Image (cartoon, rainbow, N blue to C red):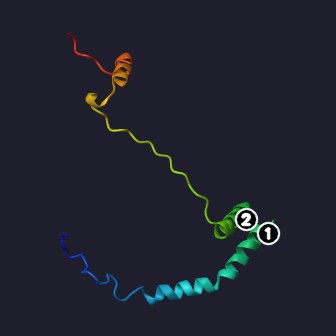
């Protein structure tokens, strides 16, 4: 293994001081406010006088927290690496010739 100035010795922590205390304090305060936050979202979602966008946003936040965010599909298109003619079957080669994909040299 190549040793660089960013490589830690085996058994040595990259963060010997651990997570900063301030972040833990902020997380603790936020967690203590969970009930208030959910109740606020719930009241906004139920308020018929609230703007539609606010109600939808509150309802979505409640659903995400209660049921988890919906899975998102990912569409991908890949281009196959071209195969050599020696790797193709006779049928594949004939189909390419018929479609005039391959130009044969003139005799």
**Is 8 in front, or is 40?**
8
Q: Is residue 48 shown left or right of residue 18?
A: right
Q: Is residue 49 shown left or right of residue 87?
A: right
Asked if the residue at tag 1 contacts the one at tag 2, i.e. Cβ–Cβ closer than 8 Å, the answer is yes
Residue sticking out furthest to the top: 107
**Is 52 in front, or is 12?**
12
The residue tagged 1 is 47
Point 24% across, 76% down: residue = 7
Name the quadrant containing residue 91: top left
Q: How many marks?
A: 2
Point 22% across, 11% down: residue = 106
Label drawn at residue 72: none
Name the quadrant containing residue 20: bottom left
The residue tagged 2 is 55
Alpha carbons under labels 2 and 1: distance apart: 7 Å
Give the x, y percent position of residue 92.
Answer: 36, 25
**Which one is earlier in the sequence, the residue at label 2 or at label 1?**
1
User: Is 12 rendered above or below residue 88?
Assistant: below
Point 62% across, 66% down: residue = 68
Residue sticking out furthest to the right: 48
Q: Is residue 105 shown left or right of residue 14?
A: left
Quadrant of the frame with the C terminus = top left
Task: Say which element carries label 1.
Answer: loop
Point 24% across, 75% down: residue = 6
| Residue count near mark 1 (Cα–Cα under 10 Å), binned few <14, some 14–19, many ≥20 | few
């Amino acid at each position: 293994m190549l040793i660089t100035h960013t490589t830690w010795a085996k058994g040595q922590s990259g963060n010997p001081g651990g997570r900063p205390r301030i972040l833990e304090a902020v997380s603790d305060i936020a967690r203590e406010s969970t009930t208030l936050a959910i109740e606020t979202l719930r009241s906004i979602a139920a308020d018929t006088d609230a703007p539609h966008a606010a109600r939808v946003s509150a309802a979505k936040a409640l659903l995400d927290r209660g049921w988890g965010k919906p899975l998102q599909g990912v569409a991908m298109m890949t281009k196959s690496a071209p195969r050599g003619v020696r790797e193709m079957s006779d049928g594949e080669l004939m189909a390419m010739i018929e479609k005039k994909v391959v130009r044969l040299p003139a005799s």
